[in-house]
C-alpha cells in the first residue's frame, strides 16, 4: 500500500535521523553555533537515550518536515504525576501553514497524556509573536511567566 505524500507520518527519531534533524533545525536557528558532525551524532545518540525524552519526527514520504522534543519529568508533587516539557519545535520553512506542526504537537500531547503527565509546558521567545499565536491555536495558555538564564557568552536566537 502506498502512502499519500500529503499525510504526515509521525514516529520517534533515531540516531539515523541525524541529517534530517540537522536540516530541520536550520529552519529554527539559521545562525546556530556550528557543531562538528561526529560530535553532533554522538550528542544526538546520547540525547535520544536519555530516559523520558522522545524526539518526534513528522515526515511526508521520505522528507522530514517537522520535529519536536518531549521530555517527561518525574515529579513528587501532584500525587507524583509527572509533567512534560516540549522544546525545539520546528517545521521546515517550505511546509509551514499546512497543519503539520499542529499534527506533530498533538502526537506529543497524546504521548504525554499516556504517561500520566498532569501538564505540558513550553517556552517561546517573548518577541516571537507568530510562534505565540501558533501555540495558543494548539491549546497552550499563557498562564505563567517563564524565565531563563543563559550561560555567559551564549548567543540569543535572532527572530527574523
Image (spheres, rainbow, N blue to C red):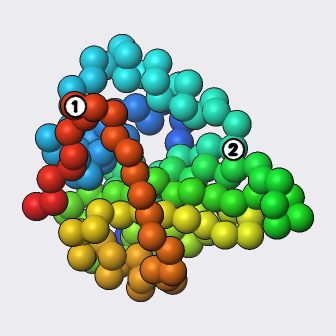
- Write down the residue under mark 2: 52
For residue 73, which numbered disc appears in the image?
Answer: none
Q: Is residue 39 left or right of residue 120?
A: left
Badge 1 density bin: few <14, some 14–19, many ≥20, Cα 10 Å: few
User: What residue appears at the point 62 percent right and 43 percent down from the top-left corner?
Assistant: 53
Q: Position of residue 19 (x, y in %)?
A: 34, 33
What is the tally of numbered marks visible in this picture?
2
Q: Could you give the CA–CA distance between mark 1 and mark 2, rounded to whole angstroms?
A: 30 Å
Query: Which SS class for mark 1?
Result: loop
Q: Is mark 1 in CB contact (under 8 Å) with mark 2? A: no
Query: Which SS class for mark 2?
Result: loop
Q: Nearer the viewer, residue 43 or 13?
A: 43
Corner quadrant of residue 7: bottom left
Q: Nearer the viewer, residue 45 or 145?
A: 145
Q: Nearer the viewer, residue 140 or 144?
A: 144
For residue 153, which numbered disc appears in the image?
Answer: 1
Q: Nearer the viewer, residue 145 or 129?
A: 145
Is residue 109 visible in the rendered image? The answer is yes
Tell me the quarter of the image containing the N terminus.
bottom right
User: What residue appears at the point 52 percent right and 58 percent down from the top-left corner?
Assistant: 86
Q: Position of residue 143 (x, y in %)?
A: 51, 80
User: What residue appears at the point 42 percent right and 83 percent down from the top-left corner?
Assistant: 136
Amino acid at each position: 500500500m502506498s502512502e499519500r505524500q500529503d499525510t504526515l507520518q509521525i514516529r520517534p527519531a533515531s540516531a539515523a535521523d541525524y541529517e534530517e534533524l540537522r536540516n530541520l533545525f536550520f529552519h529554527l536557528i539559521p545562525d546556530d553555533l556550528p557543531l562538528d558532525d561526529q560530535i553532533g551524532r554522538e550528542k544526538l545518540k546520547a540525547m535520544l537515550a536519555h530516559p523520558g525524552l522522545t524526539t518526534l519526527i513528522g515526515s511526508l514520504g521520505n522528507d522530514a518536515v517537522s520535529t519536536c522534543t518531549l521530555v517527561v519529568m518525574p515529579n513528587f508533587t501532584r500525587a507524583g504525576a509527572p509533567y512534560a516539557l516540549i522544546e525545539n519545535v520546528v517545521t521546515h520553512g517550505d511546509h509551514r501553514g499546512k497543519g503539520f506542526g499542529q499534527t506533530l504537537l498533538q502526537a506529543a500531547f497524546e504521548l504525554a497524556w499516556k504517561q500520566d503527565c498532569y501538564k505540558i509546558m513550553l517556552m517561546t521567545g517573548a518577541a516571537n509573536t507568530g510562534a505565540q499565536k501558533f501555540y495558543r491555536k494548539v491549546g497552550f495558555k499563557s498562564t505563567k511567566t517563564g524565565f531563563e538564564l543563559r550561560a555567559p557568552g551564549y548567543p540569543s536566537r535572532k527572530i527574523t
